[in-house]
């Protein structure tokens, strides 16, 4: 039996490749969780529709788990490309996910649906649910096929929200949307979960994130080598692994490990914690004094940068994507992949406790202004719903 129309129901459709767990899911799941908590506190019903994982999901009052992701190892890449040219869907399991999500939504009958970084799914649901307000939440520049890009641009019923102004303008350009029609709602951070007291015995440079080429931990370690060669004493802490709890070997990781060994050969202690569950991140951040986001890709609105701000550290980020907008004068920037420039910034901060304290205070103040309530308000406004559930 179908549910009665729910004026205060906003359903979240997770990315079709994402899961919803505290241990093996990425940033999108965290954003859905945190914004959903705000929505629940304001009296909305917020079912989450997602794929399952081997790990236990987040504790959520209305979690709709669809069928597991199907593997397509027997299908050649050439056949998958040909299929995409024919029907526009990126993957067969994405099409299945969209149909299963539709079935759940037809039962729920929500006022609005927030689709996460899945433009094809947003277009599909918009056409199948004409009376429902569809919001597409761009977490990064997710590229759809030309066919779906044209459909997305032509569908006047989809409201688009991006996690930064940088990403909003990029989406408009790629999808050929009218300028300034994609709204920006910066990601948030629960600053009260993070302490500002430092526990490191020696000034410590910290990194938090996946050890992946686009995140550029190699740039950070190389810059630390330059600083150590100047005779400056400090520690380096690396929090994270290759991918959400999985530690794998590849040429890039081998290169990072070689740089770490070189740094240790210069007498610098390097602490590698591996993957931590989200609950352990505030404690880990307390062990560093300078938080670095060295990304070489255009980071749209990094959660790790927000967490560094919340912990009251001096925050340093590469001047890419939405990071300058996110820091907004509360942190220091360096050019992408410029090892010497990063080394100069780090050396100055390590040697100057007053500068660290000043930048840390600015960072914390910035974090306190970037709440998940603010992010939720951006989504509500895009959906045409006020926080009281009215139009």
Image: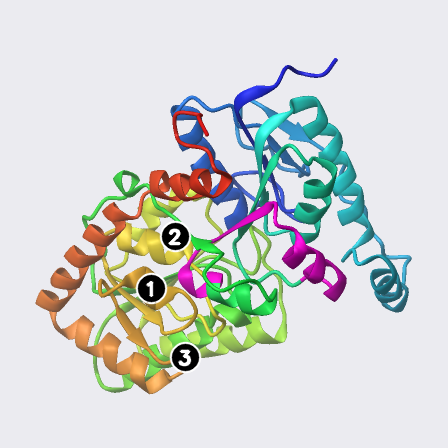
Q: Nearer the viewer, mark 3 or mark 2?
A: 2
Relative depth, front residue between 158 and 243: 158
Q: Are marks 1 and 2 in contact (CB under 8 Å)?
A: yes
Instruction: Establish if 236 lies above or below 385.
Output: below
Relative depth, front residue between 229 and 340: 340
The range drawn in magenta is 144-168
Q: Residues within 10 Å of mark 1 (few under 14, many from 20)?
A: some
Relative depth, front residue between 353 and 172: 172
The residue that label 1 is drawn on is 325
The residue that label 2 is drawn on is 186
Q: Are marks 1 and 3 in contact (CB under 8 Å)?
A: no
Q: Residues within 10 Å of mark 3 (few under 14, many from 20)?
A: some
Relative depth, front residue between 206 and 18: 18
Does any portion of residue 16 appear in the rendered image?
no
Q: Is residue 163 magenta?
A: yes
Instruction: Establish if 107 lies above or below 294.
Output: above
Q: Could you tell me how far apart the alpha carbons at marks 1 and 2 are, in whole angstroms?
A: 9 Å
Q: Are marks 3 and 2 in contact (CB under 8 Å)?
A: no
Q: Residue at x 82, y 51 (%)?
A: 92
Q: Residue at x 62, y 42 (%)?
A: 19
Q: Is residue 331 left or right of residue 43?
A: left
Which tag, 1 or 2, sits closer to the chain's start?
2
The residue that label 3 is drawn on is 336
- Residue 249 screen position, x and y as percent: 62, 67
Instruction: Establish if 164 lies above or below 17.
Output: below
Instruction: Establish if 267 lies above or below 48.
Output: below
- Residue 7 screen position, x and y as percent: 53, 22
């Amino acid at each position: 039996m179908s549910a009665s129309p729910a004026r205060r129901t906003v359903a979240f459709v997770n990315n079709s490749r994402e899961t919803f767990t505290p241990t093996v899911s990425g940033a999108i799941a965290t954003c859905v969780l945190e914004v959903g908590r705000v929505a629940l506190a304001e009296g909305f019903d917020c079912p989450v529709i997602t794929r399952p994982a081997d790990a236990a999901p987040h504790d959520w009052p209305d979690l709709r788990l669809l069928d597991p992701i199907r593997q397509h190892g027997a299908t050649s890449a050439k056949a998958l490309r040909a299929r995409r040219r024919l029907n526009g869907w990126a993957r067969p399991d994405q099409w299945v996910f969209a149909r299963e999500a539709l079935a759940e939504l037809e039962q729920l009958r929500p006022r609005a649906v927030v689709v996460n970084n899945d433009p094809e799914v947003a277009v599909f649901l918009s056409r199948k649910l004409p009376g429902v307000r569809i919001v597409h939440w761009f977490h990064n520049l997710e590229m759809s096929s030309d066919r779906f890009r044209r459909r997305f641009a032509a569908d006047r019923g989809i409201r688009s929200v991006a996690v930064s102004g940088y990403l909003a303008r990029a989406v408009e350009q790629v999808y050929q949307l009218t300028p300034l029609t994609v709204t920006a709602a910066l990601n948030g951070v629960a600053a009260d979960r993070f302490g500002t007291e430092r526990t490191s015995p020696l000034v410590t440079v910290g990194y938090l994130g996946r050890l992946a080429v686009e995140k550029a931990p190699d740039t950070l370690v190389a810059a630390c080598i330059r600083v150590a060669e100047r005779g400056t004493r400090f520690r380096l802490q690396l929090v994270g692994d290759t991918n959400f709890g999985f530690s794998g070997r590849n040429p890039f990781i081998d290169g990072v490990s070689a740089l770490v060994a070189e740094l240790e050969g210069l007498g610098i202690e390097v602490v590698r914690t591996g993957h931590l569950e989200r609950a352990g991140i505030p404690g880990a951040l307390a062990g560093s004094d300078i938080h670095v986001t060295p990304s070489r890709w255009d980071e749209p609105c990094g959660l790790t940068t927000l967490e560094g701000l919340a912990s009251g550290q001096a925050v340093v980020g590469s001047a890419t994507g939405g990071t300058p907008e996110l820091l907004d004068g509360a942190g220091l920037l360096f050019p992408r992949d410029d090892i010497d420039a990063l080394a100069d910034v780090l050396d100055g901060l390590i040697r100057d406790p007053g500068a660290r304290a000043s930048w840390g205070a600015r960072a914390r103040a910035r974090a306190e202004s970037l709440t998940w309530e603010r992010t939720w308000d951006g989504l509500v406004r895009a959906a045409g719903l006020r926080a009281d559930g009215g139009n």
